[in-house]
Image (cartoon, helix red, strand yellow):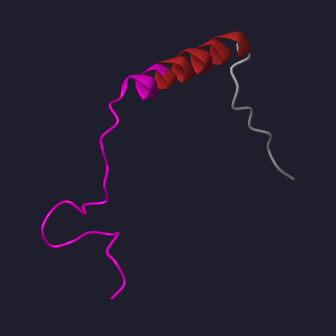
Amino acid sequence: MGELIELGTGEGGIGLLSAVISLGALGIYALTQGNGENDDDDSSPGGGLMQPVA
């Protein structure tokens, strides 16, 4: 009727270790990023997203 396709290689430990390392790198990257001071472009001429309702 159908075929069973196994996506894993049988080496579960290596995949888990790779996922943990990638998650750690992403966490470090997120923590070291600057704040950015996003004010929704209200400070520039022409307005932005947060304009008062007239």
Left or right of 53 on screen, residue 15: right
Note whether 19 is above or below 43 in the view shown. Answer: above
Relative side of 22 to 54, left or right: right
Nearer to the camera, 36 or 6: 36
| Front in this rendered view, residue 50 or 19 | 50
Write the start and end of the magenta stretch as one range: 28-54
Considering the whole magenta stretch, tell me its main secondary structure.
Answer: loop
The image position of residue 2, as x and y in percent, is 82, 50
Establish if 39 lies above or below 18: below
The residue lying at 32 percent from left, 31 percent from top is 34
Q: Nearer the viewer, residue 16 or 45?
A: 45
- Seen at 25% across and 61% down, the residue is 41
- In percent of width and height, residue 11 lies at 70, 13
18 in the magenta segment: no
Residue 31 magenta: yes
Q: Quadrant of residue 49?
A: bottom left
* Camera-side residue of 31 and 37: 37
Horizontal and vertical percent position of residue 39: 31, 54
Position of the C terminus, as image quadrant, is bottom left
Is 26 placed above or below 37 here?
above
Residue lying at the far left of the rendered structure: 45
Looking at the picture, how far across and down is residue 8, in whole percent?
Answer: 70, 25
